[in-house]
Amino acid sequence: MTGSAPNPAGDADAVAWGELLAGSYREIGERAMRDLPIYNDALEVEAVGFRRFNGTIVGIMVTPWFMNVMMPASAAGESSGATLRIRFPAGDIEFTLSEVGQMGRIASCSLFSPMSEFADMAAARATAEAALAELMLPADSEEAVRRREPATSQIDRRNFLRGGLTERRG
């Protein structure tokens, strides 16, 4: 985490908050989502990577119908559906406020919905972990700059000389 010392007790609280939120979504899934066409039966509800960040909690919620970056929200006076921008190491991210059962007000940023492109929970979890790692990577870090550069391959001289890299016109 940028600018903060490890806090095992705080991270334990963050994990617990993520698990409580996952419990709320499990209940929503059973009650209201399971029979909808956007529900991917290969997936389950899981809180991924919940941790302390800049005085609050952040993590990714994976469900059979969405994957969102989530955090508690305490924006007084803001109604559900309002948006707010939160600064992360990777940059500013826009979140939408909503209420989730007994959890109260949360802020969420959609990554995927529906979840039909995920074949299994391992793929969804790996994607969530990678997305959270990217979110915490400073935008100007050497690693982030390297990841943004387009992949280049060396030109094979033989193919170039044989015209293998030119457009075929028919």
Image (cartoon, helix red, strand yellow):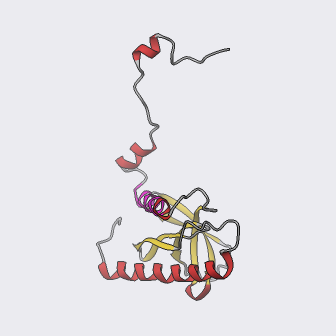
Is 86 situated left or right of 34 in this image?
left
- State yes or no: residue 34 in magenta: no
Write the residue at 68% across / 73% down: 81
Residue at horizontal 54 percent and vertical 67 percent from the top: 43
Give percent across and percent down for residue 6.
29, 73
Q: Residue at x 64, y 68 (%)?
A: 39
Of 3 and 107, the residue lying toward us: 107
Secondary structure mainly formed by the magenta segment:
helix
Q: For the view shown, which residue lies furthest in the top direction?
A: 161
Drawn side of residue 1 relative to residue 63, left or right: left
Query: Is 109 placed above or below 30 here?
Result: above
Q: Nearer the viewer, residue 99 or 85?
A: 99
> In what quadrant of the picture does the C terminus appear?
top right
- Quarter of the figure with residue 24: bottom right
Q: Position of residue 27 (x, y in %)?
A: 59, 83
Q: Which residue is more in the foreground, 152 or 30? A: 30
In magenta stretch: residue 133 = yes
Q: Position of residue 19 (x, y in %)?
A: 46, 80
How many labels were placed on the picture?
A: 0
Q: Quadrant of residue 76?
A: bottom right
Q: Position of residue 78 (x, y in %)?
A: 65, 79
Q: Residue at x 35, y 64 (%)?
A: 2
Q: Quadrant of the N terminus?
A: bottom left
Q: Which residues are magenta?
A: 125-138
Vertically, is 129 above or below 12? above
Residue ranking furthest to the right: 36
User: With 110 as the anchor, is 153 left or right in this view?
Assistant: left
